[in-house]
Image (cartoon, rainbow, N blue to C red):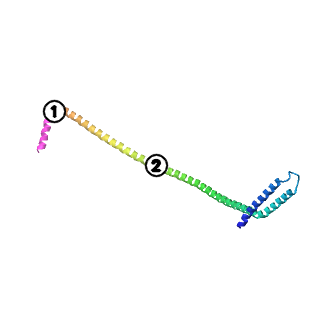
Amino acid sequence: MKLRNILPGVLMVFLCLVAETAIAASGEGGGGKGWVAADTYRVMNFVVLLVALILVLRKPISQALSSRIKTIKEQLESLETQKAEAEKKLAQYNEKLSQLESEAEKIVQGYIQQGNEAKAKILKEAEATAEKLQLQAKRNIDNEFDKARQELQKEVVEKSLVQAEGMLRQTITDEDQDKLVNEYLDKVVA
């Protein structure tokens, strides 16, 4: 196998040397007098060399070309499978993307629903707080009315007492006063 790989290289070197010798020999010839025997040998030498090259290199060249074709086919098949896998992944990613969009919409709907529930809860608590504040305000008002009524009664009683005292002072004489003092002392002593 190694000999087959080396043989074409050796043959190429040999042919190059023969061709170089032929070219050098033609340079010594007779200065362009037409077709001479040396030219005939050169052409024959070239034809033999060409036939030998074709015979020797035909198989390695065809093997090299066929292996290159095989390599290219394998690369194309590999690329096709990679393309199919990439398309499959793209379809999966598109599906996931559409699922993400629907999931995002579900999340937004959930947040809207939670917001509405929180709003309703806040309104309910606000109404309850408003009712409590109204009851407290009513109690405070009632307490203030009671206080005002008691103060008014107290003031009326005080004024009545002051007025009654003033009336008593005008109507009671010194004799009436002595009499009241004696009666009080009798009650205390008894």
Q: Residue furthest left?
A: 189
Q: Is residue 182 left or right of residue 127?
A: left
Position of residue 97 measured from the top left corner of the image (x, y, whole percent): 60, 54
Quarter assignment of residue 6 = bottom right
User: Is residue 132 part of the magenta span, yes or no?
Assistant: no
In this view of the protein, which residue sits in the foreground, 70 or 4? 4
Position of residue 129 measured from the top left corner of the image (x, y, whole percent): 42, 47
Q: Residues within 10 Å of mark 2 (few under 14, many from 20)?
A: few
User: On the rendered image, what quadrant is the N terminus found in?
Assistant: bottom right
Q: Is residue 113 left or right of residue 94?
A: left
Residue 71, numbered circle: none
Position of residue 104 measured from the top left corner of the image (x, y, whole percent): 56, 53
- Residue occupying image coordinates x 48% and y 50%: 118
Position of residue 130 measured from the top left corner of the image (x, y, whole percent): 42, 46
Amino acid, disc 2: Ile
User: Is the residue 91 above or below the residue 165 in the image?
Assistant: below
Instruction: Give the label, 2 or 1, closer to the camera.
Output: 2
In this view of the protein, which residue sits in the foreground, 105 or 189? 105
Amino acid, disc 1: Thr
Residue denoted by label 1 = 173
Question: How many badges with numbers are in the image?
Answer: 2
Q: Residue furthest bottom?
A: 1
Residue 122, numbered circle: 2
User: Which type of secondary structure does the marked residue at label 2 adopt?
Assistant: helix
User: Is residue 176 part of the magenta span, yes or no?
Assistant: yes
- Residue occupying image coordinates x 31% and y 41%: 147
Cα gap from disc 2 to disc 1, whole angstroms = 76 Å
Q: Which residues are magenta?
A: 174-190
- Residue occupying image coordinates x 83% and y 60%: 45
